[in-house]
Amino acid sequence: MAPAERFSFQLKDRDDIREPFHAVLRKLLPAGARPATMVFTPSLETSEGTTASSVLVVEHDRWHLIVETETRDTTVTSSTIDRTVLVEMTVVLLLGRLKFDFATQHDIRSVVIEFNTVMEHLYQEAAEHILGAMKGLPSPPAPPVKRETELELLHSVPLKFRNSILRFTPPAERILNLAYWPAILVEHRGLIEHELSPESALVLCERELLLISEEKLLPGDRPEHRFRIGLVNKHGSIAVHGLLSRLSEFRFGGIGGSVTLDLLFQVDPVIEILSLVMPADQKHAVVELLRQALRLKREPRKPAPGG
């Protein structure tokens, strides 16, 4: 790997990159084109192997992911913004992951970019560009909202989740409601056999639902070990963004001390189902939040600031 490729960087234009990416960008972008952002990601050594180098291009109405193959060729995955269903950001210590789920005419497909979190801000910016375009917001985005009116809501959740909510909520989105639930652990003789559901929060914003959760504990972790190290520091956070305009319905199931929740996001003609598990005693609060979300979806939308 060349020294300049140790970390991710933002491209200034289509000529600001080596081959084989340069040739692909010249085909994708006309001369003088100014995409919202272009990010080069170098290959990474992870516990699961070596990832491929890539370039993410975010235009105002579509995005492209160009991935370098072992033979120095490329594969290109593209989608229009209006076919993008979910945007997911995972941050685990020094490893980050940005994932886009998008609809074809027949099914839901995904692309994933793994990156060093030293340059996380580049990927947060790319995600915010795509989410803003999905919502029809102007570019550049509106100024960040003031969170003073949301303090009562934010103080109802543990500090680590308060920080995660502030970290992943789009700056121009007001927080209208949220529901938090602890992890559901299956224990036996002091050992966690498995984690049925991670600690999570569902956040209702003006134009989106945001699900924030912690990665699951590994089998065999001791409760006292988890308490001492801390779930956030050890495992990291996952944030999934889904637009209210694409939320078609929600469904509950399950019995006993836990329930399952399916959130259905529709981009005709396909539906993506985001499934999660939560304690049964949190169902009422989540139902009220989701009913509020569907009411908000049906209300006439005020013009976006600056639109």
Image: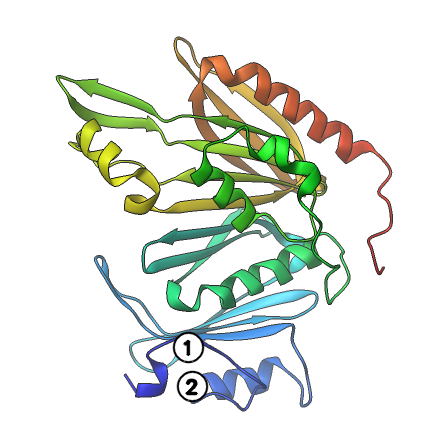
The reply to whether callout 2 and callout 1 are in contact (CB within 8 Å) is yes
Residue type, numbered disc 1: Thr
Where residue 58 sits: x, y (%)? 60, 69
Q: Nearer the viewer, residue 231 or 80?
A: 231
Could you tell me which residue is drawn at 43 percent across and 45 percent down?
A: 238
Could you say which disc has been placed on residue 20 in the image?
A: 2
Q: Is residue 58 above or below residue 247?
A: below
Q: Can you see residue 116? A: no
Where residue 37 sits: x, y (%)? 59, 73
Name which quarter of the figure residue 250 lies in.
Answer: top right
Q: Quadrant of the N terminus?
A: bottom left
Residue type, numbered disc 2: Pro
Image-based side of 250 in relation to 307, left or right: left
- The 10 Å Cα crowd at callout 2, few under 14, some 14 to 19, many 20 or more, is some
Could you tell me which residue is drawn at 51 percent across and 68 percent down?
A: 122
Instruction: Give the structural element (helix, strand or loop) at label 1.
Output: strand
Could you say which disc has been placed on residue 283 in the image?
A: none
Image-based side of 294 in relation to 225, left or right: right
Q: CA distance from mark 2 to mark 1?
A: 7 Å
